[in-house]
Amino acid sequence: MYVAAKGGERAIRNAHALLAKRRRGNRALPALTLDQIAQQLSLAVDRVMAEGSLYDVELASLSVKQARGDLIEAIFLIRAFRTTLPRFGASQPVDTAAMLVRRRVSATYKDLPGGQLLGPTFDYTHRLLDTSLVGDIGAPTAEIGGAEPADMPRVTDLLGEEGLIESAPADDGAEPFDITRAPVTFPVDRPTRLQTLARGDEGYLLALGYSTQRGYARSHPFVGEIRVGDVEVKLFVEELGFEVSLGTVQVTECQMVNQFKGSAEVPPQFTRGYGLVFGQSERKAMAMALVERALRWKELGEEPGAPAQDEEFVLSHCDNVQATGFVEHLKLPHYVDFQAELDLVRRMRAEHEAELKEAAE
Amino acid sequence: MTTATLGGMPAITYNFAYLDEQTKRMIRRAILKAIAVPGYQVPFAAREMPMPYGWGTGGVQVTAAVLGPDDVLKVIDQGADDTTNAVAIRGFFEKTAGVATTTATTEATVIQTRHRIPETPLRDDQILVYQVPIPEPLRFLEPRETETRQMHALEEYGLMHVKLYEDIARHGHIATTYAYPVEVAGRYVMDPSPIPKFDNPKMDDCPALQLFGAGREKRIYAIPPHTRVRSLDFEDHPFEVQRFAQPCALCAARGVYLDEVILDDRGGRMFVCSDTDYCESRQAAGHRGEMAPPDAALPQPVSPRGEDATRVSDDASSDLSASARGRPAGAGAGAGTGAGTGAGGTEAGHD
C-alpha cells in the first residue's frame, strides 16, 4: 500500500527541519559567519550579486549560507527579495573611465596609457592544489599595491579617436527599459539585451560565447580591455536639482573588439561587444561581450544561423532562476496528465494489436 | 518596510499577500485587460516570487492580486488539496495574507489550481486561478514568440488544425489528452493549462471568473463568466472526453476524473477520484465504492480548515490528516509517480 501522502504539510515541515540540520552540518564545528563568506568566498558572493541583480554583499553572503553554497539557489533567494523592493529611480550612467581600477588588462596593446595592471587574478597561477591553505596561513607576505593611480582611458576610446571602431551608441538620456519591471517583447533594444545578459547565467553565456569562437557566428574577437574596480553610482534627485552619490559598486567591464568588413555605407572598422557585470567576474563579462556581439548580426548586416545569434532563443533561456524552476518543476506530481497519457497509450496499443491481428488473418 | 534590526541586519517585513501594492495594481490592470479580451494573452511584468518558476508563480501572483482579507482560499494540485505544492502555496497565503483557507470547493471564493477543475460546479461568486506553465497554445508548433503573436493577431490557426488533422491521420483520433486547445468567445485559441481534456467542457459557460497566470512566461489571460469555450475539433471527429470504465472505488462516483492508484507489484490497482474534496464529500453523504473504508473511518463532511478560518494551528492540520482516513494511503499524492512510498523524508521529494 502507499504511504499516506496526506499530511503533506507535516512532511514539508519535517523536510525543512532536516534541511536546516543538514545546512548547519556538524555542530562541533563553528558556524560560518557572513563576514567569512563575504571575505573568503567573495567570488561566489559576486556571482550571486550579479545574477541576483542586487548589489548587497551582506545579503548575498547570507543567501550563500542559506543555500548551502548552491549559488543558483542563492541567486533565487536574492531575486525573491529584490522583487519586493520599491524602485526609486534610475541612476546616472556609471562612468567606467573614472573607475578606481583594481585590475586592467588589454590584449590589443602591449602598453597603453595607464598601463596594464594585473591585480588579483587566477591567470598565470599554476593550478596545483595548495596544501598550505589547509590551515590558516595568515596574511601573505608579498608586497601588495604600489601602482600609482593613473588616468586610464578606455581602449575603445583610444581606437575611437582614430575612427577605427564604431562609435559607442549615443546616450539619449532616456530612462532605459527595466526588464525587472516590464515584460520583454521581441525584438529587444540594446538596454534590454544588455540587462538580460548581465543577469544571465554564467555557464550558459560561457557556452554560447565559446560557440562563437568555434565557428558558430565567428566574430574574430580581441579583448580590447577588461577592467575591474569600483565605480560611483549617482542619482539625479529631481527635488534637489543635483546629483547625489549613492556609493560605489565593484564591476567588471569587458570591451571586446571585433572585426567588421564594412558595408556600402560604412568603411571597414572594428565593432564592439560589451560586457558589464557586478563584482569580479571576467569569465562572465567576456562571455557576455561575445554573445552581445553575436546578437548584433542584423544591424551589422551579417549572416544569421548560429544559436548565439538567435535573440529569442538566447535571451529567453539565459535566466537561471527561470530555467531551474521550470526544469525542477518536473518533480511536482503530474499524475493527472500522466493518467490521460496512460489511457491514450493503452488505447493505441489495443488498436495496434487489433490491427496486427487483422493483418495476420 | 524595514522595521527593527535582527543580528545587525534590518528585519524584513512584507506587504499583505507578499506583493507591494504597485505590483498588484499592475497585475490587476493586466487582469482587467485579459477579461476585456477573452483568451488573449496579456504580457505582464511578472515578479520573482519566493517559490520557483514553474511551481505556480503566475497563479500565485494572480491570486495575490485578487485576494482580499475576507476571501476564503482553496489551493489544489492535481485535484487534491493535500499535495505538497498545494500545501506550500496555501501556507504561503496563510503566512503572508492571513486569509482563511478551506479544502471545500463550495466554501472557497478563490480557488488556485494546477492541472484540474473541481468536479463541483463553480458559482458566480468564485474565481478560479489556473497555474500555467506554457501559455502559448501554438508554442510547440512555432517556438518563436514574434511569430505566434502575429498568428494570433491574424487569427491564423491553420497550423493547429493541421496538427490535429495529422493526429487523426496517424492515430485515427486526436492524440492530445491534456492542455487540449480551446477557442474562446469565437476568437482566440487558448491553452487551458495542462488540465486533462476531460475538464475542458467545464470551462464553457462557467459562471465563475477564470484567470490564468503564467509567471515565467509573463502572461495573464482570462475567461469571463458565461463565455463560450469550444474545444477544437472537426465535424467528423468531434471532441470527446476521457471515459473511465469503472466508478470511483471509494465514493462510486461516475463521470468524474479518476486517478489510477497502484496497490501492489502484482498488477493490483484501483481508480479513485482525482478531486479529493468531491470524493470526501460524497463519502460523507453516504456514497460507497467497492473499496470504501467501513463507516467508522468516515472522513469529516466538510473541511475543518474552512470553519477554523483566519489562522491555521497545528490542531487544524492534524484534523486534515485525520480526514484522510477515507482514502487509501497515497491516493492523494504520489500515485502514478511511484514516489511517496518511503517515510516522511521520501515524500518531501515532491516539495
Image (cartoon, coloured by chain):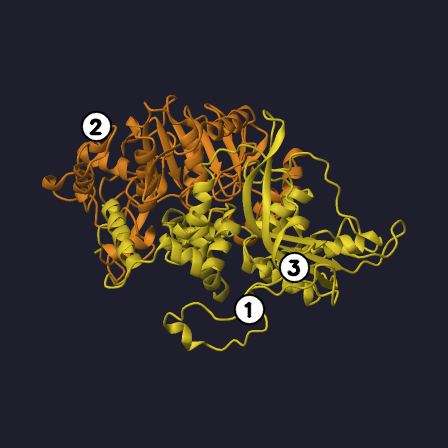
Chain colours: A yellow, B orange
Q: Write down the chain letter for disc 3.
A: A
Secondary structure beneath dot 3 equals: strand
Taking depth in this image into account, of A202 and A302 the one nearest to the observer is: A202
Which tag, 1 or 3, sits closer to the chain's start?
1
Q: Is residue B14 above or below residue A5?
A: above
Q: Secondary structure at mark 2?
A: helix
Chain ID of residue with mark 1: A
Using residue B92 as the reference point, say whether residue A353 is left or right of it.
Answer: right
Residue at 30% over, 58% down: A31
Cβ atoms under marks 1 and 3 closer than 8 Å: no
Q: Amino acid at mark 3?
A: Ile
Please determine whether, in this image, residue A41 is positioned above or below residue B292. Answer: below
Q: Residues within 10 Å of mark 1 (few under 14, many from 20)?
A: few
**What residue is disc 1 on?**
A122
Q: Quadrant of residue B295?
A: top left
Q: Is residue B7 left or right of residue A182?
A: left
The single residue placed furthest to the left in the displayed view is: B296
Circle count:
3
Badge 1 element: loop
Tag 2 and tag 1, C-beta contact below 8 Å:
no
Residue B67 position, x and y percent, is 38, 27
10 Å crowding of disc 3: few (<14), some (14-19), many (20+): many
| Amino acid type, residue under disc 1 in the picture | Phe
Disc 2 versus disc 1: distance between alpha carbons? 63 Å
Q: Residue B131 location, x and y as percent?
A: 43, 39
Report, in whole angstroms, how far the alpha carbon at label 1 lies from the one at label 3: 14 Å
On the question of residue B228 being in view, the answer is: no
Q: Which mark is residue A226?
A: 3
Specify the amino acid type for callout 2.
Glu
Above or below, comparing residue B155 to residue A73 in the picture = above
Number of the front mark, 3 or 2: 3
Residue corresponding to mark 2: B307
